[in-house]
């Protein structure tokens, strides 16, 4: 092994340890709930907790709705910007990046100020309103990921020709978007969707400040009140996130038709 | 009024006028090619007919119905693109059936029509494939079938052969023409390839700087070009300057040799005029016509069936000529003194 290779391996090993050691430590700790034996007791307790089931189910539902809203918002926007207003692309890209620059706490304070009970649109005053506000907030949080992946997907297909071909065959905008454009950027939409899912599942700031009982606040509450269960919960959350990443890879590789192979 | 009527079409992009007053009538079932270099406005006219560009002024009508303001998806015009533009997520059959599905046809009718179209393009077994599993030529055939399936009133072909290799281009252009004749569909074909335009079309429109320079049959365009641009763009051409001696009588002096033209040139005596001459109308030796010019061979290009020879004429200028290759006779050699001959009837007097 040459000196150069040795240093490369050392760098990789260091990075690997940096990422894996805390995970291994956390997993190890989560298995030690019962004295003297390794067991999944902490996982059993967590998974059997009705509050876990309720908050986790709620967050999954909210994540799915966020994905639908994100697709409805982002796919037509990215498509028309590319097709009709290419000069607007830098501006739109900047806007979609804003949620990465502005801290969530600032965004949610803005929401609470604008949509409070004494405002014109008192969304925070009702259960439905709060949920809608949270949904819209999550769609905003996921914008950078959703927009970027959809836009990248659109770049790989000749949307102008496909659109004109569909138009010459009589198709209107809704059909073009649903039957021609969306299926061809499906893999990109999916990767945006999984990232959105991962963000929404563990989100804390929005949910806590809007006083919504979702999975994020539940994890924090658990962390403050129990010893072993929070570690188990963190491992569960990690597995979900990693499963999402794995699914992105899987769909990218095994999609029935690949634009790259054309 | 013609079946497809294009009247005074103009298109500007900002200050740039891409199409200037384009007028053309196309009869039902006619195959018309727009031929010209890139940037001449041919594709823009096609896209205005298709509804993908809005004319700055002018009108387009099909079968006496004004369609200028009609959106592309309601014009019933089929279009084939240079980049195929097949929907990658749909099978060949679904691609072909797309327009029928949009039109709300029943499943059985779609299946029947798709089978008929696949038969027409000679790919009956490929219905279940995806576009990426087809060759370029096959993809373009499918694109043609897709455009024809909903029985459009007019078919627009936007350089459909440009992305294909030479052999497939020739076979596909013959196939396109056969299908067009069989179906009798009114067709506009845009190309920058003169061979395609001449070999396929009923009429050719040679476009230059946003106007139709000349409209005519391939025979007229090639043999009787009316402008210098058409003469230069279509085929290979010798451009020779001559002195006008007597305009009314058509007497000119070509490389010092007196010649009488059939048609009086539109200039005054004493002026220089421009004459054009196809290489295949000039012969080596003295037997090619009434005008004989002595010269010396400066270039010889062996092209296979044809040998192109360039001769520097004694009275000034140089003329290229084509002679057939003959296996038992070696090609002419550079530097050899030769006589070349031509008929005064083959000399074209160019307007501009």
Image (cartoon, coloured by chain):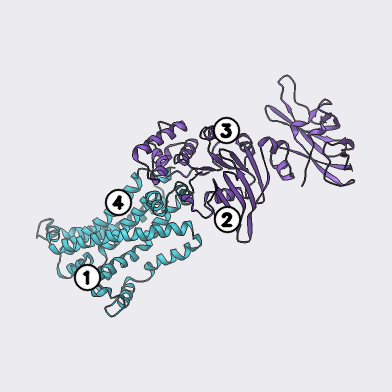
Chain colours: A cyan, B purple
Q: How far separated are the C-alphas under marks 3 and 1? A: 69 Å
Do pointers 1 and 2 mark residues of a single chain? no
Q: Is residue B206 left or right of residue B123?
A: right
**Foreground tag (3 vs 4):** 3
The quarter of the displayed image where residue A239 is located: bottom left
Q: Nearer the viewer, residue B172 or A98?
A: B172
Residue at label 1? A127
Q: How far separated are the C-alphas under marks 1 and 2? A: 53 Å
Q: x, y (%) of residue B177?
A: 55, 34
SS at badge 1: helix
Residue at label 4? A246
Q: Is residue B83 left or right of residue B90?
A: right
Do pointers 4 and 1 mark residues of a single chain? yes
Q: How far separated are the C-alphas under marks 2 and 4? A: 51 Å
Q: Does label 3 or label 2 sit earlier along the sequence?
A: 2
Q: x, y (%) of residue B165?
A: 55, 36
Q: Chain of mark 3?
A: B
Do pointers 2 and 4 mark residues of a single chain? no
Q: Chain of mark 1?
A: A
Q: Chain of mark 2?
A: B
Q: Is residue B23 left or right of residue B100?
A: right
Which residue is at a point 40% across and 53% down the rendered structure image?
A: A177
Residue at label 2? B55
Residue at label 3? B170
Which residue is at a point 33% across and 44% down the rendered structure image?
A: A254
Which residue is at a point 40% across and 45% down the rendered structure image?
A: B103
Q: How far separated are the C-alphas under marks 3 and 4? A: 48 Å
Rendered view: B13 above or below B42: below
């Amino acid at each position: 092994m040459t000196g150069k290779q040795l240093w490369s391996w050392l760098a990789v090993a260091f990075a690997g340890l940096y990422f894996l050691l805390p995970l291994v430590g956390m997993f190890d700790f989560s298995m030690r709930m019962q004295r003297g034996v390794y067991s999944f007791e902490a996982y059993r307790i967590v998974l059997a907790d009705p509050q876990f089931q309720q908050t986790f189910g709620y967050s999954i539902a909210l994540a799915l709705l966020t994905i639908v809203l994100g697709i409805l918002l982002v796919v037509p926007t990215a498509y028309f910007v590319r097709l009709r207003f290419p000069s607007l692309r830098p501006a739109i890209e900047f806007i979609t990046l804003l949620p990465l620059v502005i801290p969530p706490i600032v965004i949610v304070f803005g929401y609470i100020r604008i949509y409070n009970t004494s405002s014109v649109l008192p969304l925070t005053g009702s259960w439905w309103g709060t949920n809608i506000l949270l949904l819209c907030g999550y769609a905003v949080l996921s914008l950078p990921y959703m927009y970027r992946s959809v836009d990248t997907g659109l770049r790989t297909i000749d949307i102008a020709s496909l659109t004109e071909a569909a138009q010459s065959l009589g198709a209107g905008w809704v059909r073009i978007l649903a039957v021609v454009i969306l299926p061809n950027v499906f893999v990109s939409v999916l990767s945006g969707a999984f990232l959105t899912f991962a963000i929404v599942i563990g989100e804390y700031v929005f949910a806590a400040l809007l006083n919504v009982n979702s999975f994020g606040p539940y994890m924090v509450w658990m962390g403050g009140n129990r010893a072993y269960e929070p570690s188990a919960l963190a491992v569960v959350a990690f597995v979900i996130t990693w499963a999402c990443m794995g699914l992105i890879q899987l769909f990218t590789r095994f999609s029935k038709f690949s634009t790259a192979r054309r | 009024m013609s079946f497809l009527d294009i009247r005074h079409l103009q298109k500007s992009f900002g200050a740039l006028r891409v199409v200037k007053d384009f007028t053309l009538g196309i009869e039902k079932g006619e195959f018309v090619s727009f031929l010209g270099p890139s940037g001449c406005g041919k594709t823009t006219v096609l896209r205005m007919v298709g509804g993908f560009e809005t004319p700055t002024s002018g009108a387009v009508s099909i079968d006496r119905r004004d369609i200028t303001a009609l959106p592309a998806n309601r014009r019933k015009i089929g279009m084939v693109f240079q980049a195929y533009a097949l929907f990658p997520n749909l099978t060949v059959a679904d691609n072909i059936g797309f327009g029928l599905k949009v039109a709300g046809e029943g499943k059985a009718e779609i299946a029947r029509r798709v089978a008929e179209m696949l038969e027409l393009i000679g790919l009956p077994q490929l219905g279940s494939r995806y576009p990426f599993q087809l060759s370029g030529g096959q993809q373009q055939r499918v694109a043609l079938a897709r455009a024809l399936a909903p029985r459009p009133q007019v078919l627009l072909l936007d350089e459909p052969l440009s992305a294909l290799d030479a052999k497939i281009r020739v076979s596909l252009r013959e196939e396109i023409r056969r299908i067009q004749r069989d179906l009798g569909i009114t067709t506009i074909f845009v190309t920058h390839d003169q061979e395609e335009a001449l070999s396929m079309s009923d009429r050719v429109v040679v476009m230059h700087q946003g106007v139709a320079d000349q409209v005519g049959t391939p025979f007229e365009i090639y043999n009787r070009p009316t402008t210098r641009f058409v003469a230069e763009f279509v085929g290979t051409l010798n451009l020779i300057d001559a002195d006008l001696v007597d305009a009314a009588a058509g007497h000119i002096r070509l490389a010092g040799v007196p010649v009488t033209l059939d048609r009086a040139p539109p200039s005054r005596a004493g002026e220089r005029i421009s004459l054009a001459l196809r290489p295949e109308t000039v012969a080596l030796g003295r037997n090619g016509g009434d005008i004989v010019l002595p010269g010396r061979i400066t270039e010889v290009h062996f092209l296979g069936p044809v040998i192109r020879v360039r001769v520097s004429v004694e009275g000034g200028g140089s003329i290229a000529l084509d002679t057939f290759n003959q296996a038992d006779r070696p090609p002419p050699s550079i530097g050899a003194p030769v006589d070349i001959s031509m008929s005064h009837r083959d000399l074209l007097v160019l307007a501009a």
